[in-house]
Image: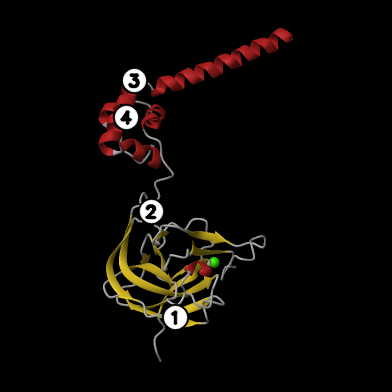
Amino acid sequence: MKSTIFATILVLLAGLTQAAVLERRACSGNNIVRAAEKLQRESNWCATWLAAGTTTVSIPAHIAATPAPVISSACSCVYTASSTTTTTTAPPEPTEHLVDFEDDDTPWVGFIYLDSQGRGSYGRHRYTESSSPQQLEAFSGENYYRGIFKFRNTDTKHSYEFSNTKAFSVNPNTDYDITFRFRQFGYSSSLVCSVAVQVYNSVQWDSDNISGAVMVGLIGVLELTWQGDPTTTWAKAVGGRIHTGGASGIALYFRTDCRCPDELTECGVLGTVTAAFDDIEIKVRPPTP
Ligand SMILES: [Ca+2]
């Protein structure tokens, strides 16, 4: 009994080995595989054969004597049907945009920072309950974008600039409203910060260069007014109207200038200032009734 089982296992093992060898041989360069290779290369014949089945495809004369299963086997060696050939069409980009800085990945928003001494920091900032009370809560969610800088006695002005690195898609020949939330934090009654926004139709971005945003094609400068007081709360900048003309994209360039008032002889009393942005919105202007 024991020897019978052993013999059966040996036979099974032999069968497996033989099948494996046969398969390798089927894919080696024998005549029928070479013929299949040529047919596939020249006319996609193997793909058609394997897809359509053996009854509806005419067999070239030089392999007509070969049994169909052998042809299929050879064709399988030279052509593998792929399920990844379906083309995917990217969904159209939205023409209205909200930048709330909540995503980790905000690839089209890059920023540059300037001040006369090159001091300060900038970036997307996350406010949590454990943050210092001196820090600023976001307008939406937990995140906003900020520049932060400290006045020294000899400083008269700090400027903070940023732009997006990829133009937002918009409809040409359309009126858009551009709004955003801004807050100046660390306010001293005599400090004045102002925000100016320029709109371009594209931006070229060199990510290796910290100041690598090159704005192209000025469309206009936004005339802004404030809903609220940006020194005490998040105020909404409104009135930023733009007509896209021939442009199908717009890129925004923000500049914040914070000046030490002339009457202050020692600007260091202004301390640390945060210029913060959140919820930048680009929307088609509703038609006026
Ligand atoms: Ca936010």
From the image, tell me which residue sits under label 3.
30
Q: Quadrant of the C terminus?
A: bottom left
Q: Hey, what amino acid is under mark 3?
A: Asn
Secondary structure, mark 1, is strand
Residue 24 drawn at (x, y percent): 43, 21
Q: Nearer the viewer, residue 275 or 141?
A: 275
Q: Residue at x 38, y 74 (%)?
A: 196
Q: Which mark is residue 36?
A: 4
Tell me whether the residue at label 4 lies in contact with that at label 3, contact meaning CB atoms closer than 8 angstroms. Answer: no
Kindly tell me whether mark 3's CB lies below 8 Å from ligand 1.
no
Neighbours of disc 2 within 10 Å: few (<14), some (14-19), many (20+): few
Query: Which of the two discs, 4 and 1, labels the residue nearer the N terminus?
Result: 4
- Amino acid at dot 1: Val
Is disc 3 in contact with disc 1, using a CB cutoff of under 8 Å? Answer: no
Q: Quadrant of the N terminus?
A: top right
Q: Secondary structure at mark 2?
A: loop
The image position of residue 137, as x and y in percent, is 60, 68
- Say if 196 sits above or below 78 in the image: below
Question: Which badge, 2 or 1, is on the more N-terminal residue?
Answer: 2
Q: Amino acid at mark 4?
A: Ala
Residue 244 falls in which quadrant of the image? bottom left
Disc sitting over residue 185 in the figure: none
Give the residue type that dot 2 points to.
Ile
Nearer the observer: mark 4 or 1; the answer is 1
Residue in view at x 42 percent, y 61 percent: 91
Q: Is mark 2 within 8 Å of ligand 1?
A: no
Residue 238's label in the rendered image is 1
SS at circle 3 = loop
Q: Secondary structure at mark 4?
A: helix
Residue 145 appearing in the image? yes
Q: Which mark is residue 210?
A: 2
Find out whether the residues at labels 2 and 4 contact each other: C-beta distance under 8 Å. Answer: no
